[in-house]
Amino acid sequence: MIYVNDLRKEFKKTIKEPGLKGSVKALFKPKNEIIKAVDGISFHVEKGEMLGFIGPNGAGKSTVIKMLTGILTPTSGTCEINGHIPQKNRQEYVKEIGVVFGQRTQLWWDLALRETYSVLKEIYDVPDAEFKKRMVFLNEVLELESFITSPVRTLSLGQRMRADIAASLLHNPKVLFLDEPTIGLDVVVKDNIRNAIQKINEEEGTTVILTTHDLADIELLCNRIVMIDKGKKVFDGSVSQLKHDFGQMRELQYELISIKDLKKLNYNEDLKKNEEDISMSNEGALVTVRFNCDAVSVEEMLSYTLSKVHVKDINLKDADIEEIIRRIYRQEVSMDEV
């Protein structure tokens, strides 16, 4: 469905020296620097797959999405989506995709939502019978009925996000690009949006590319993630594979009976481990210890802790996906292993 091969995007940036002299020099003899926003990324997405596409701010993920949607033209490399080159024959291509940007809307601010959908119906040239069928489905999945007659400007953020997702699906696209679809939403609304996305993917077979900073979205919706950093792909695989390969870090959390016991704890010195393998922090009597179970066993950590201090309660957790990704971004996990 989606084929991305050695995709690259470079931008030319003018380097300006400070002061008036620098401004004049930049005007007549500009010095340019080439910025590699995307540097040789390749991946393939199957029909009906839901892919999590993640990376820190400035990693290049938005640039990749803009090339896949046809907004930007690659410097080199190719991308093909459902047989289309996004930058060619744009009018036909946009009928194949739906796009939702969390902080932007494609809805008309002062029109009632129902009227907005009627306008989009004409833009996408959706037949009447198909439009009615789509609206029944979207009403069922996204629960639009309670606010479909309201002007867009009166909608809450959660309602507007549901309305935007519906707008992107009116023409039954083959691929749906979702950029931060749950940003700024409360927990209940987030769950509703996630359930809707999952139902659309399962019932319609829509291929979904999801970019988000909310890693709960990734864990709940995506079986596979592509992670990029500094314009390069650093991981491509399943969430379970990521946890299996790089989930060595665990977290031991407990509450001390007496905060005075805190001075008895010196994991690094007593267990002869460096700070990369064991790190401790506390908020009053609540102590959190993160440790690499490849370097020190769970049994050893528990035995040491209970021999040194008295605790009210103790809890051991596996590393969550957020902690793993944080370590990869900090290059605590070798990129050669990815």
Image (cartoon, helix red, strand yellow):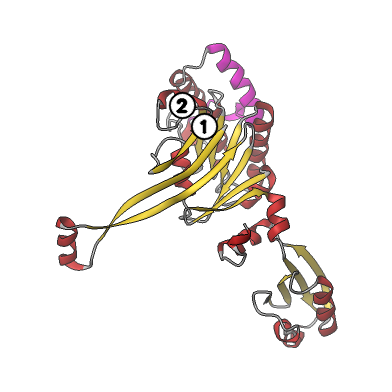
Q: Is residue 54 above or below residue 199?
A: below
Which of 268 and 32 lies nearest the eye of the viewer?
32
Q: Are marks 1 and 2 in contact (CB under 8 Å)?
A: yes
The amino acid at mark 1 is Ile
User: Quadrant where the N terminus lies?
Assistant: top right
Q: Residue at x 64, y 58 (%)?
A: 322
139 in magenta = yes
Place residue 290 in its image quadrant: bottom right
Q: Where's residue 275, x and y in %?
A: 65, 78
Q: Nearer the viewer, residue 179 or 72?
A: 72
Q: Which residue is mark 2?
A: 93
Numbered label attached to residue 81: 1
Residue 51, percent across and down?
Answer: 61, 42
Could you tell me residue 20's position as x and y percent?
16, 65
Q: Residues within 10 Å of mark 1 (few under 14, many from 20)?
A: many
Magenta extent: 128-151
Element class at badge 1: strand
